[in-house]
Amino acid sequence: MPRSLELARVLVVDDELSSRLTLQTLLEAGGYSVDVAGSAAEAFSKLDQGQYELVLSEAEVDSPQAGLRVLSYARVKPYKPATALVTAYRETKASRYPVGDEQQVSINAENVSALLGQVADLIGMRAQRRANRAAAQ
């Protein structure tokens, strides 16, 4: 019996409805299973209830740096999702924040293939880290 295809799960966190829907649509068209959150509180709840391969968050979800708190929270989950700061602006307001280990993904709807490539790379790096940890045990 054939196995059903399991899509990589992505959580998109953005308080702007149009940005959330655009990114959700692009990622779903790229073959990902996408959940969305419009606030940090909603994101925390989703991170507690499900498991994601990737969490993308805008920096200023509810307040300055709330998105960074979401990403920090995601990184300590036992399933260790990849995380990235996301912005829809060419001149990123996210660049004002210290992002530490965060990957910064610039969303440009005109270059969907680059966006999907960045997402695939982030998920691939997560898979490699998990394989390395498993091999070390």
Image (cartoon, grey):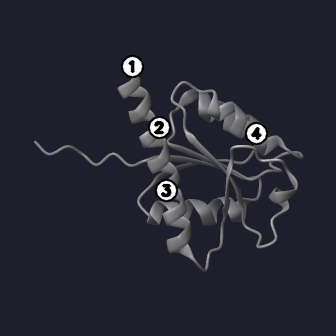
Res. 25 in view: yes
- Depth check, mark 4 against mark 1: the one in front is 1
- Chain-order first, disc 3 or disc 2: 3
Name the element at disc 2: helix
Q: Amino acid at mark 3?
A: Asp
Name the element at disc 3: helix
Q: Residue at x 60, y 62 (%)?
A: 23
- Asked if labels 1 and 4 touch by Cβ distance under 8 angstroms, the answer is no
Residue 137: which numbered mark, if any?
A: 1
Q: Residue at x 74, y 53 (%)?
A: 58
- Chain-order first, disc 3 or disc 4: 4
- Asked if labels 1 and 2 touch by Cβ distance under 8 angstroms, the answer is no
The quarter holding residue 78 reads top right
Question: Residue beneath label 4, please?
Answer: 40
As drawn, is 94 to the left or to the right of 82?
A: right
- Chain-order first, disc 2 or disc 1: 2
Q: Marks 3/2: CA distance?
A: 12 Å
- Chain-order first, disc 2 or disc 4: 4
Front residue of 106/101: it is 101
Q: Amino acid at mark 4?
A: Ala
- Depth check, mark 1 against mark 3: the one in front is 1
In the figure, 86 relative to 26: above or below?
Answer: above
Question: Residue beneath label 2, please?
Answer: 129
Residue 121: which numbered mark, if any?
A: 3
